[in-house]
Amino acid sequence: MKKISLLLSCLLTLCLLNAQPPHVVKHLKITVLSTMLANAGLGEWGFSALVEADGTRILFDTGSHDSTVLKNSRNLKLDLSTVPTLILSHNHDDHTTGWLTLRKYLQSVQSNSLQVTHVAPGFLATRMNADGTEDHHRYQDSIAYAAMKGTLVSHDHFTEIFPGIYLTGPVPRRYPETNYNTRGRYKNNAGEIVEDNIPEDMSLVIRTEEGLVLLSGCGHSGIINNTSYIQAQLHQPIYTAIGGFHLFNTPDDKIQWTAKELKAAGIKYFMGAHCTGIEPVYQIREWAGLKRGDCRVGAVGDVFETGKGFIAAALAR
Ligand SMILES: [Zn+2]
Ligand SMILES: [Zn+2]
């Protein structure tokens, strides 16, 4: 009996020695490079943000015009040529139009700029136009990107892509958040034409000392579907949510539910940019009990920084 308990305690010690604590990003800075509101630079219906997490630099989405992200980054004195990693949250043009032009230009400055692009399954799927014709744009873009020596990586599940930095991959639709245009159609793997609920829509998550930070492109998979899925994976409060959350035409009762769920998830900072809409941000501020400076409409040049919260462009203060 003594031998068995000794063996068990040795095994337990070995387990404890092997169980490494999760990596925590010490300094995180997120700068908005594309959204509708702009204090200086160019505003557009689109989204893009630069993520700087300790030494890791990531571009998240690329805006809706060829040159917006490049022009706004120059204006903000941010050098994108030293950013090797790109994440495209989903297939829509307002997040992907800058993809090839940015790679082409930045590659001429530094060969590995935006050399790896992360997406989720469904990103390359054929979309159906309103007149019944097929749209192969993202597939064609991927061929052009490969010709520019770019590598496309597709994630079909929750993944830690860098220490303390995670991609959700496709988000389970646990709650009926229909934060997309239900008239859209796409061709699934079986070749059937079905409702396009943007199956590839994914978010970025960063683990910091203060909690988790969520960065979303359009939030078509639903902000609460995202927060609940992320918390089930990482077991920590989500204290900051930034990006497009596609709430602009969501009814009041659903915004109220969203605010309540965000509060329960631990939200302290909320920046609704792009398709979040204006009024829903103020409703979330009220119903989640957040302060003016901590819950705001995002503008080009706005910054979130660990330990500081939001540093907003003048128009959005
Ligand atoms: Zn979208
Ligand atoms: Zn969008």
Image: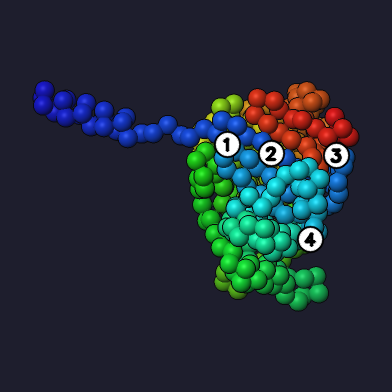
Q: Earlier in the sequence, mark 2 or mark 3?
A: 2
CB atoms of marks 2 and 3 within 8 Å: no
Q: Position of residue 190 (x, y in %)?
A: 57, 71
Q: Along the line of sight, which residue is nearer the eye, 299 or 186?
A: 299
Where does the image place residue 148, in percent across and percent down from the top left?
62, 68
- What's the residue at 60%, 60% (across, down)? 111
Any part of residue 144 in sight: yes
Q: Secondary structure at mark 2?
A: strand
Quadrant in the rendering for residue 1: top left
Question: Which residue does the numbered mark 3 point to in the structure image?
Answer: 278
User: What's the mark number on residue 30?
Assistant: 2
Q: Secondary structure at mark 1?
A: loop
Residue to which mark 4 is pinned = 66
**On screen, residue 133 above or below 110:** below
Q: Nearer the viewer, mark 3 or mark 1?
A: 1
Q: Quadrant of the C terminus?
A: top right
Left or right, residue 109 beside residue 314: left
Q: Residue at x 73, y 49 (%)?
A: 48
Q: Which amino acid type is shown beneath numbered disc 2? A: Ile
Q: Residue, x 67% and y 58% (percent of image)?
A: 109
Farthest residue to the bottom: give it. Answer: 133
Q: CA distance from mark 1 to mark 4?
A: 29 Å
- Disc nearer the start of the sequence (1/2): 2
- Cα distance in 3D space between marks 1 and 2: 12 Å
Q: Nearer the viewer, mark 1 or mark 2?
A: 1
Disc 2 from disc 3: Cα separation: 20 Å
Q: CA distance from mark 2 to mark 4?
A: 21 Å
Instruction: Look at discs 2 and 3 and give the one toward the viewer.
Output: 2
Residue 54 is tagged as: 1
**Residue type (three-letter) at the residue carrying disc 3:** Ile
